Amino acid sequence: MQTEPKIIRIGEKIRLLEVRSARPKTTCISLLLLTPMHQNPAETTVLASYLAHSCARCPTLSKLNARLESLYGALLSGEVSRLGEAYCLRLSVDCLADALAYDGQAVSRDALELLLDLLLEPKMQDGRFDEAQLRTEVRLCAEDLESEQNDKRAWALMRMLEVMCADEPYGYPHEALLSGVRAVTAESMYRAWRELLKTAHITVQVTGDVDFAPLEALVRTRLGALADRAPAELSTVFVERCDDVTELTEEQDVSQSKLVLGFRTGSVNRDDDFYARRVMADLFGGGPYSRLFMHVREKLSLCYYCSARLQRQKGLLVVQSGIERKNRDVAFREILRQLKVMQAGEFSDEELTASKKALCDAFAGVGDTPEGLDVYYAQFADGDITTPEALAAGLAAVTREDVVRAANALTLDTVYLLAGNDEEDAEHA
Amino acid sequence: MREVKNERLSESYFEIDHPSGLKILVYPKPGYKSAYAVFGTRYGSIDTQFRLPEDKEFTTVPEGIAHFLEHKLFESEELDAFQRYAETGASANAYTSFDKTCYLFSCTGNFKASLEILLDFVMHPYFTAATVQKEQGIIGQEIRMCRDEPGWEALFQLLRAMYKNHPVRIDIAGTEESISHITADLLYKCYHTFYNLSNMVLCVAGGVTAEDVLEVADRLLPVQKPVKIERKFHEEPRGVNAPYVEETLAVAAPIFSLGFKESITTPERTLREILLSRIVLEAVCGKTTPFYTELLEAGLINTSFDYEYFCGYGYAATIFTGESPDAKEVQNRLIARIRDLQETGIGEADFERIRKKLYGRAVMAFNDIDGIANAMVAAHFCGEGLFDEVETLGALTLDEANERLRRSIDTTSAALAVILPKGDDVCNS
């Protein structure tokens, strides 16, 4: 299947990605807008929610949802995520493939039009964002941020990253974002929206089996007309190594403790020795064949999960595990011991082959569905794209020496423990 | 071998009654590189009491044993299943729910080799005292992890509040105490009862053919004599066990789970009843309803609000979940809303709009081979075909929906479970 997308330049840092997928049931359309993290973080967060819940043409949630239902239950989402030290505001729709509409409706065109309406013609009153809706969105975003502490695994990871990257935009504190969100006003949000349209790097992704021509025309008309474009520069701080380890323990009344280790990978940009680092991270703590799974979980029975993940866009590798508090030291020592094994190249050829096979196998299937391709290409919204086929080929070419080099480039930066209340039943092992 | 076709979707799959006694369903997706296989048994956490024709008494087994067995089946005397999959590059996993246990893998290459591993390890149990003991530590951590997940806790608090006798009230993984009673002998007893091919199904979807699957199945599956399993039917009183329960956890805001227990006279719900219940739920509080907007604007719910029709062998309920500062008020308003709608009935236009949405969502699901294979398992265990949902949706009437609304939701059989935040328990050390 052909997954090489067609890239069409629409304007200054505005591009359209047309990705063809054979005989799908859906079309996926995403608007991706990247801005520097330090530029209106709170407003950008609220904006994603506001824009995804109304527009001038569908001014209430009921009207917007009725519109989506008439598009065969199209799924709309609006969210903000991080891509390195950029915020990515994403508005996307998954909708029924045009060929399957029982009333001949051009679902994809209607869905794209709706997305562009949401972004470009928000619900306004007298040139301002609607105050009542804004208050609701602020509440929803604040509650959403507060409820992040309900997921202890994600919370521990976030706290570790805040500590590790305290001097970098990446470590922007959750608390600061939360208070910023509460302080968002109709004026500050309007300014942030204007700035977003002026400065963002914009990618429109359309994936499916559709007639692209009318969609391209629509994107040209609506986004090509954006005035005063002045795209911001996107950059991310890469700290190559760390020489002194920070340790922090925080207590919470939870049943299971979470141990999180943050490493610097040694990379200086998102593409630097990427393939070697990706395979290394997988062999270290990816699938069930990895060192961490085999030893920390299976041999020592210390945990249900112990994984290593590469954060390519920031040059980090993070190890996470859920353990009993009294096992903190033994788990920590075992994780570092397995890293030494990696660095000394004392892993077997079978392990290396297993890791490469699993990774290549996973990427080879990305092109099967529009959903898979949409998520895959979104990670390249900050620059040049690589097709899943090319990525798989790059991973397949990684050698033992590459993995050892990548493992030796790792330096431990921060060790974080979210310590639970499991002391009282410490006799259970 | 029988081909099951759907003209509307222009899709089809093959149904095979294999000589071994196993039902095999294969859904080829030409053009797909990946394939997904799932081997499932109709055996879940609710099957704690059962009897074979030769048994005098019902056998009662410890809570959580189906899930424990799922973990242990991956092991063998030589290489465990994960190590074997490492050679093929497939990504493997398993899950246990209330009423089934499924083993699965996805891959892009080496399909037959991976299928061989799947069929082989599921057909060859290997349990010893030592391996059982090792797993108690790992699953103990899994249980603790779930105890810290407020949504999960709220659901099980609710199930215990609604059900007095039915084992749907017990946690799928059991407790650290209950799993300590699991022995190798008990695992074999459960295995030989429920892992009989006549109680199982193999479903495959993706870039494969029925011949590929049969070539491996013919070679690996022995002919088995079917078993007749008698599941204990648990007498359940009409009303709820407790109308209100609460618990405190380290969460940001109160989380609730509200259920209306349905009074049922037969153990299972038909597909038609399930689809009608989904339409009813959308009509009661879907995002298009003014009622949903009212709750949102009153600050009573946020974007985490959700609802589902929840049913299985011997249990059925309508469940609402979310985060709210005043869950009791949400309950009061929902009861008033339901009574009101039971009185006035769902309107024709709303019914058609909801039906169109559910149709679109059902069709869109046919992209996803994971979803297709798992849906085939679920449909088979319910005695339905995969395309029945799309076809039945088209045949539902407004009168049936209103009838279902009036009969299935008993507003006097409500239970509310709330997870309240603990005091200020986050501190640094």
Image (cartoon, coloured by chain):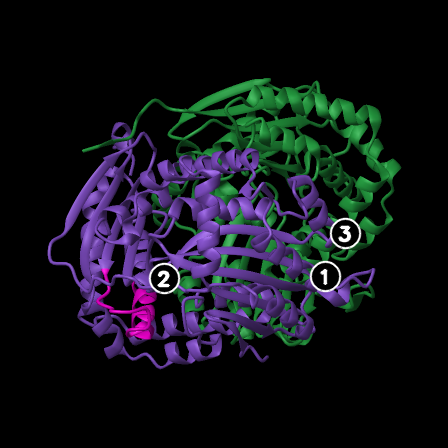
Chain colours: A purple, B green
Q: Which mark is residue B389?
A: 3
Image quarter where the C terminus of chain B lies is top left
**Tag 2 subunit:** A
Q: Nearer the viewer, residue A426 or B121?
A: A426
Q: Work out whether disc 3 and disc 2 sit on a shared chain.
A: no
Mark 3, other Cα within 10 Å: few <14 / some 14–19 / many ≥20: many
In the rendered structure, which segment of residues is drawn in magenta?
Answer: A264-284
Of residues A423 and B421, the one nearer the viewer is B421
Q: Which residue is mark 2?
A: A286
State whether residue B174 is above or below residue B196.
Answer: above
Q: At numbered mark 3, what does the secondary structure look like: helix, strand or loop? A: helix
Relative placement, left or right, of A138 versus B339 is left
The answer to whether the residues at label 3 and label 2 have Cβ atoms under 8 Å apart is no
Badge 2, how many Cα within 10 Å: few under 14, some, many 20+?
A: many
Residue A296 seen in the figure: yes
Look at label 3 and name its amino acid: Glu
Q: CA distance from mark 3 to mark 2?
A: 37 Å
Residue in view at x 71 percent, y 39 percent: B282
